[in-house]
Image (tube, grey):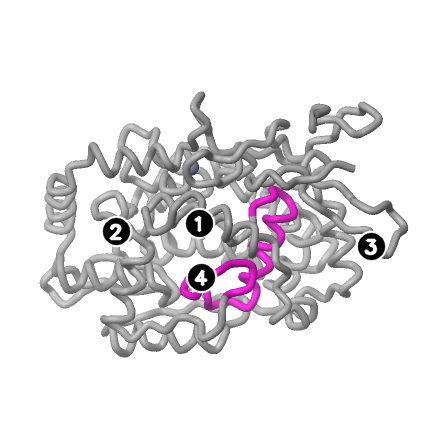
Amino acid sequence: MRPATKTSTGKELEVKYGLPRKVKFCKICCITNQRPCSVNEYSHSSDSKKKTIVFDEEGICAACRNKEKQHQEIDWEDRDKKLRDLCDRFRRDDGYYDCIVPGSGGKDSVFASHLLKYKYGMHPLTVTWSPHMYTEIGWKNFQNWIHKGGFDNYLLTPNGKVHRLLTRLAVINLLHPFQPFILGQKTFVAKMCARFNIPLAFYGEMPGEYGTTEGTSLGDEMKFADLPGAGFSKDMIGGRDLKELYLGGTKVGELIEEYGLHMNDLLAYFPLDYATFVEKKIEIYYLGYFVKWDPQECYYFSVDKVGFEANPVRTEGTYSKYNSLDDKIDGFFYYTSHIKFGMGRAMQDAAQEVRNKKITTEEGKALIKKFDGEFPVRYYKEFLEYTGLTDQEFKDLCDKFRSPHLWAKVNGERSERSEWKLRHTVNQDGVDD
Ligand SMILES: [Zn+2]
């Protein structure tokens, strides 16, 4: 077989985004080595290079190795004690809140908030950064979280006109429809801590679960504060002029000059000023550092405690019914990830379930083959309306963002049967030009 890094004419294939040229799949969980680690979104422009998940010499990804470590080495009793000590340090009995738990009312936020309140005796304020467009089931689960779970909640909905514009730009510049949402969501938590003078917050799952090394290589690995993209890290802001930051792959200065926005329109997306973060002594942790995090268990827990509902129909692009259900844009986040990295929603779900020993590697492969990259038809019309793109414009953008080392066009450019196929798949049924 000829090397798959070249075309039939022997030309070296172009590799976009600084992805690894040689495509590999983890021998345990099937995740691709093209999977990017989280980036500092404030400097994310169309020519940013990605760091990707680390694979070892045996072809096993860092997320699987982290999981093994969890199964073998972690002393969960000790972690529980650490959490109790932390809670004791912040717990209040004067009627005010003592921690913030962000979330959407999905299974993870239900699990985190419930545990902190009812097991560890904390008094959380829950905060929510609104999805682009709530799905019916997402809204219902959100309401159940608050009403049946018994929490106070602040819901922040960013200016819809600005959010649409940024989402549109993020699709055009980065093929990343979720980027403005992520920016807002990440910085929002620290800002709520500052605003309400609640110096403790908990995120849920550790990023190390998914193989980002940043989350676990820090000396003090349970802390969120210094991670890239956390919304308030020192390096990220480092005295930079806000006008130099990127939102939706566009410089803030340009958003103001060319799109007529005011700084105030972008307030919700700007990071918290680092001096405030320090002055208010804010500490943010991953609860997943202290307690075992198993998405399926979180799901059962949420059903039991607040009547969480899975989708009545299968989520497009995957086989599962309970992961990120609340935003009509969700499907496009995963679909565009399949375009850019050859990693869709089924692959991410399957990899996680293999690691948590819910399914086998072989079952994972079969699910990926069946569902990965499926087009999210259900909310497509609303997605196009939201971003102001036509069907053709969106499809052209997708094609523009396909990296040639991942995708081949089979049956010729002009043929009616012409279609894009992955060159490499975990099932080894990839194609060449
Ligand atoms: Zn793996």
Q: Position of residue 384 (x, y in %)?
A: 69, 67
Q: Amino acid at mark 1?
A: Glu
Q: Position of residue 331 (x, y in %)?
A: 56, 61
Q: Which of label 2 and label 4 is nearer to you? A: 4
Q: Residue at x 78, y 53 (%)?
A: 396
Which residue bears the numbered disc 4?
A: 320
In the rendered structure, the answer to whether residue 200 lies left or right of residue 398 reads left
Q: Quadrant of the N terminus?
A: top right
Residue placed most toward the observer, 117 or 359: 359
Say whether residue 164 is visible. Answer: yes
* Magenta segment includes 321: yes
Which residue bears the numbered disc 2?
A: 199
- Earlier in the chain: of badge 1 and badge 3, it is 1
Indicate the secondary structure of the residue bearing disc 4: loop
Query: Cα distance, mark 2 to mark 3?
Result: 58 Å
Which residue bears the numbered disc 3?
A: 417
Mark 4 sits near ligand 1, with its Cβ under 8 Å away: no
- Earlier in the chain: of badge 2 and badge 3, it is 2
Q: Which residues are magenta?
A: 315-343
Query: Cα distance, mark 2 to mark 1?
Result: 44 Å
Q: Amino acid at mark 2?
A: Pro
- Earlier in the chain: of badge 2 and badge 1, it is 2
In the rendered structure, the answer to whether residue 202 lies left or right of residue 207 reads left
Q: Quadrant of the C terminus?
A: top right
Residue extending farthest to the right is: 414
